[in-house]
Image: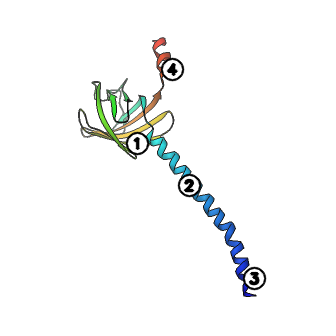
C-alpha cells in the first residue's frame, strides 16, 4: 500500500515538473529578448519630444542621437554636433564628450526610445524615434 502512494505521488510530480520547466524556459526566452532589444540601439534616432524639469521644451528642436558604432555616437543635444565615445550598461548609456552625460533607458521598442538624464542641473526626458535610411531619403525629398 505504501508503494502505491509513492507511485501516485511521483506521477503527480511529473506534470508539475513539466509545467515548471516550461515556465522557466518561457521566462528565459523573454529575458533574452528584452536584453537584445535594449542592447540594439545602433542607428539614427530623431528627437520628437523633450521635457526639461517636467515641462515641454522647444530648445532641442531638430536634435538627434546617431549611434554610429558599438562605442561611437553623434549628437547635437548640446546644440553643437559632436562625436563621442559611449558605453552601455544594461539600461544606462554613458557619453563622455563634450561632458559626461548618463542617459537612463526608460523604455525601448523597435522604433521608439525614451531616455531620462540630467544635464547641467536640469532633468530631461527625451522621446526619440528611429529613422531608417529609407525614411531619411523620403524626408529629404519632401524638403
Q: Identify the residue at horizontal 26%, vertical 37% (top origin).
A: 96
| Crowding at mark 3 (Cα within 10 Å: few <14, some 14-19, many 20+) | few
Instruction: Say what secondary structure mark 3 lies in.
Output: helix
| Front position in the image: 105 or 15 | 15
Q: Position of residue 99 (x, y in %)?
A: 23, 35
Q: Which mark is first along the chain, 2 or 3?
A: 3
**How much space separates mark 3 and mark 2, taking CA atoms?**
35 Å
Secondary structure at badge 4 equals helix
> Reading the chain from its start, which is encountered first: label 1 or label 2?
2
Which of label 3 and label 4 is nearer to you?
Answer: 3
Residues at circles 1 and 3 in contact by the CB criterion of under 8 Å: no
Q: Name the disc covering residue 27, or none.
A: 2
Residue 66 relative to residue 10: left or right: left
Number of other residues with Cα within 10 Å of mark 4, as a class: few under 14, some 14 to 19, many 20 or more: few
**Residue annotated with mark 1:** 105
For disc 2, the neighbor class at 10 Å (few under 14, some 14 to 19, many from 20) is few
Note whether 58 is above or below 33 in the view shown: above
Q: Secondary structure at mark 1?
A: strand
Q: Which residue is mark 4?
A: 134
Left or right: residue 13 versus residue 108 is right
Asked whether the beta carbons under mark 2 and mark 4 sit within 8 Å of each other, the answer is no
Residue 117 is situated, as x and y percent measured from the top left of the image, at 33, 40
The residue wearing badge 3 is: 4
Which of the marked residues, 3 or 4, is nearer the chain's N terminus?
3
In percent of the image, x 57 and y 59: which residue is there?
A: 24
**Left or right position of 135 against 100:** right
Amino acid at each position: 500500500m505504501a508503494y502505491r502512494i509513492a507511485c501516485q505521488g511521483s506521477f503527480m510530480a511529473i506534470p508539475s515538473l513539466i509545467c515548471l520547466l516550461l515556465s522557466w524556459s518561457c521566462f528565459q526566452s523573454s529575458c533574452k529578448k528584452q536584453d537584445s532589444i535594449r542592447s540594439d540601439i545602433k542607428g539614427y534616432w530623431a528627437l520628437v519630444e523633450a521635457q526639461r524639469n517636467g515641462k515641454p521644451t522647444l530648445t532641442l528642436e531638430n536634435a538627434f542621437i546617431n549611434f554610429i558604432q558599438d562605442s561611437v555616437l553623434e549628437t547635437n543635444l548640446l546644440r553643437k554636433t559632436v562625436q563621442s565615445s559611449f558605453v552601455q550598461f544594461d539600461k544606462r548609456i554613458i557619453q563622455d564628450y563634450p561632458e559626461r552625460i548618463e542617459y537612463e533607458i526608460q523604455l525601448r521598442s523597435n522604433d521608439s526610445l525614451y531616455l531620462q538624464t540630467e544635464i547641467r542641473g536640469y532633468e530631461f526626458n527625451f522621446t526619440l524615434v528611429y529613422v531608417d535610411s529609407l525614411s531619411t531619403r523620403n524626408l529629404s525629398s519632401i524638403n
